[in-house]
Image (cartoon, rainbow, N blue to C red):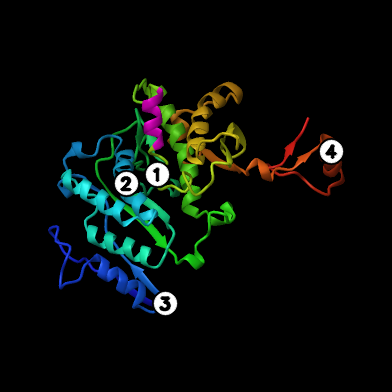
């Protein structure tokens, strides 16, 4: 295998050096290198904190959600292989005085190379920041005071201080068309470990947001529109749960205390026309009342401050066209005989 590191062409806004530009290099990388070439492009994303010269007000609290929102247009363009959208996102952030990447020309070359090889989509395989390193789920979840915290140092109780500093990173992989899972392929086989962690992290984040808001009497989630906008940042436009996973799928989310005591199980069926991302977020919001009123094991700040106390889940329901309708008698017969058990996607008629 060959490996090429994408160069940083120029600084100070000048895209050209030695008569090469992003389009030239992208074409060369796509068509003049050996077929087994691995092209690597690297840049940091948003820097936040006094050591980076950032104004404390440039990334409003909660910083992790603010960062995700500001980076969303850029990552959406990268994931959807849209060079024009990437250029626009980079220029817009630069014009605001707060750049979103320290090597924007590298990103321009990478997305143009992906377009030149015909990659239909970039797979986001990781997305995190330097403040979320305490637990594997921390990179996909945020936690709350009046709104979620982003850093959770060992031994620190919630509520606590906002995140004082962070450096953002993302990993995106582009494959040629022949090796990229099609939308029509099995959704479950096309999902990456990060996709799964993002969905589970969103459930935990929504629960933490609402639990902390109630405990502190915060009004930051008050009002349907404001709450929806805040929570939508957990599933940005580039998330596979917004487009790649068809909205004909349903979802159930839930949690258990110390792994064996269920305290929430709530969902949205496939006939709900909204995106699976919105189904996950909205169903997660129902977990607060479900845990308190039905299961009688409410969420508390004490439970949420311990990463091991709660186990969260996301279950997908296939489109109704793939469901099998069986009678209760058939279920009883097959279960008693030991021949079969019906899975979550099967429906029993009355």
Q: Element under label 2?
A: helix
Question: Is 227 colored magenta in this rendering?
Answer: yes
Q: Is residue 117 above or below residue 342?
A: below
Give the percent coordinates (x, y) of residue 284.
50, 33
CA gap, disc 2 to disc 1? 8 Å
CA gap, disc 3 to disc 1? 32 Å
Residue 66 picture quarter: top left
Can you identify the residue that label 3 sits on?
Answer: 35
Residue 209 picture quarter: top left
| Mark nearer the viewer, 4 or 1 | 1
The answer to whether residue 131 is seen in the rendering is no
Give the percent coordinates (x, y) of residue 100.
24, 50
Of labels 4 and 1, earlier in sequence is 1
Q: Is residue 62 left or right of residue 99?
A: right
Can you identify the residue that label 1 sits on?
Answer: 237
Question: Is 216 colored magenta in this rendering?
Answer: no
Q: Element under label 3?
A: loop
Can you identify the residue that label 4 sits on?
Answer: 332
Look at the numbered discs 2 and 3 and tell me whether their residues touch, using CB distance below 8 Å. Answer: no
Q: Is residue 145 above or below residue 89?
A: above
CA gap, disc 4 to disc 1? 44 Å
Can you identify the residue that label 2 sits on?
Answer: 73
Q: Which residues are magenta?
A: 224-232
Residue for point 41% across, 30% down: 228
Of labels 4 and 3, earlier in sequence is 3
Look at the numbered discs 2 and 1 and tell me whether their residues touch, using CB distance below 8 Å. Answer: yes
Q: Is residue 53 left or right of residue 250?
A: left
Of labels 2 and 4, earlier in sequence is 2
Q: Residues within 10 Å of mark 1 (few under 14, many from 20)?
A: many
Q: Residues within 10 Å of mark 2 (few under 14, many from 20)?
A: many
Q: Is residue 178 left or right of residue 59?
A: right
Nearest the eye: 27 or 89: 27
């Amino acid at each position: 295998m060959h490996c090429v590191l994408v160069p940083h062409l120029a600084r100070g806004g000048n895209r050209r050096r030695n008569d090469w530009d992003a389009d030239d290099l992208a074409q060369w990388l796509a068509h003049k290198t050996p077929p087994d070439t691995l092209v690597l492009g690297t840049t940091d994303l948003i820097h936040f904190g006094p050591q980076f010269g950032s104004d404390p007000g440039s990334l409003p609290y909660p910083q992790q959600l603010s960062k995700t929102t500001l980076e969303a247009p850029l990552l959406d363009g990268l994931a959807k292989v849209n060079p024009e959208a990437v250029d626009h996102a980079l220029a817009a952030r630069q014009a605001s005085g707060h750049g979103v990447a320290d090597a924007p020309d590298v990103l321009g070359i990478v997305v143009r190379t992906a377009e030149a090889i015909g990659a239909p989509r970039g797979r986001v395989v990781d997305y995190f920041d330097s403040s979320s390193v305490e637990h594997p789920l921390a990179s996909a979840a945020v936690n709350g005071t009046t709104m979620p915290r982003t850093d959770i140092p060992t031994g620190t109780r919630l509520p606590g201080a906002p995140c004082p500093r962070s450096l953002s990173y993302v990993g995106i992989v582009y494959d040629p068309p022949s090796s990229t899972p099609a939308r029509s392929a099995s959704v479950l086989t096309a999902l990456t470990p990060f996709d799964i962690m993002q969905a589970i992290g969103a459930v935990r984040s929504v629960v933490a947001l609402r639990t902390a808001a109630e405990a502190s009497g915060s009004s930051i989630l008050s009002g349907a529109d404001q709450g929806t906008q805040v929570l939508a940042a957990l599933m940005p436009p580039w998330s596979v749960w917004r487009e790649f996973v068809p909205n004909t799928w349903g979802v159930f989310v839930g949690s258990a205390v110390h792994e064996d005591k269920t305290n929430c199980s709530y969902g949205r069926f496939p006939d709900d026309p909204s995106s699976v991302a919105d189904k996950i977020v909205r169903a997660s919001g129902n977990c607060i009342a479900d845990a308190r009123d039905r299961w009688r094991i409410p969420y508390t700040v004490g439970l949420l401050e311990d990463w091991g106390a709660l186990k969260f889940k996301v279950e997908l329901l296939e489109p109704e066209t793939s469901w099998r309708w069986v009678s209760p008698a058939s279920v009883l017969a097959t279960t008693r005989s030991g021949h079969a058990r019906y899975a979550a996607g099967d429906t029993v008629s009355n």
